[in-house]
Amino acid sequence: MFTIFTKKKLSEDQLANFFVNSTIKLVETGFEDVVEIINNDPEFAQNPSLSKEDSDQFLLIVLAGNIKLLSNYFESTQGARVAERIYRKLGSTLMTERAVLKETIAKYQSWMGRVNHPSKNVHYSMSKGFFFKYGLNDYQTDYFKNMNTPNPIFLKRLDEIVVQFIFDWAEIKDTYRIVE
């Protein structure tokens, strides 16, 4: 009788596989739209002419932000186990050594934290990370270009784009009981 009130079980391996596969697919299918929106944004003095094939940095930004958010939803040991499983799955999927990938993502997380300082909001760090990794400052009006800071109107639009790439860890925790 109480089974209708219990959550379904989801193993940490299944969660890692789902996260990796869905994130990679989302970036592969969504990056083209991101590029089109940014290339046509009226706040730029010049068209950035981003390439639809240049999604590697964006994937790393999305992965770095989403993995950083794990600690907000899982207790530390479970979060660390899930992260390790994610790195293992990512390594095999992207044909990269797990340790190299983990180090690269850690560098992205650290760098994104610095460009977003003093805010600790991961969502905003992803937006600013995108802005700087793709060199969008070069295409702004002189005022913002000289300040080396994103135009706040554009940054708000970029925040609205990036939020679409944030994994819904809360929904997963509400729907499933994550087991080792």
Image (spheres, rainbow, N blue to C red):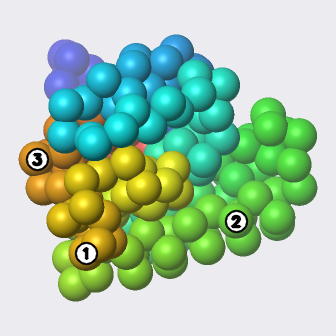
Q: Residue at x 25, y 75 (%)?
A: 147
Callout 1, which amino acid?
A: Met
Q: Residue at x 61, y 73 (%)?
A: 107
> Where, by quadrant of the figure, is residue 137 drawn?
bottom left
Between circles 3 and 2, the one closer to the viewer is: 3
Is the residue under label 1 in contact with that under label 2 (CB below 8 Å)? no
**Mark 3 and mark 2: Cα distance apart in space:** 30 Å
Is the residue under label 2 in contact with that under label 3 (CB below 8 Å)? no
Element on which disc 1 rests? helix
Tell which circle, 3 or 2, labels the residue nearer the N-terminal end: 2
Tell which circle, 2 or 1, labels the residue nearer the N-terminal end: 2
Q: Position of residue 135 (x, y in %)?
A: 49, 55
Between circles 3 and 1, the one closer to the viewer is: 1
Callout 2, which amino acid?
A: Thr
Number of disc labels: 3
Q: Residue at x 66, y 40 (%)?
A: 56
Q: Can you identify the residue that label 3 sits on?
A: 153
Q: Position of residue 131 (x, y in %)?
A: 39, 54
Element on which disc 3 rests? helix
Q: Nearer the viewer, residue 23 or 3?
A: 23
Element on which disc 2 rests? helix
Q: Position of residue 14 (x, y in %)?
A: 60, 32
**Mark 2 and mark 1: Cα distance apart in space:** 28 Å
**Mark 3 and mark 1: Cα distance apart in space:** 15 Å
Q: Can you identify the residue that label 1 sits on?
A: 147
Left or right of residue 92: residue 80: left
Q: Can you identify the residue that label 2 sits on?
A: 104
Tell which circle, 3 or 1, labels the residue nearer the N-terminal end: 1
Callout 3, which amino acid?
A: Ile
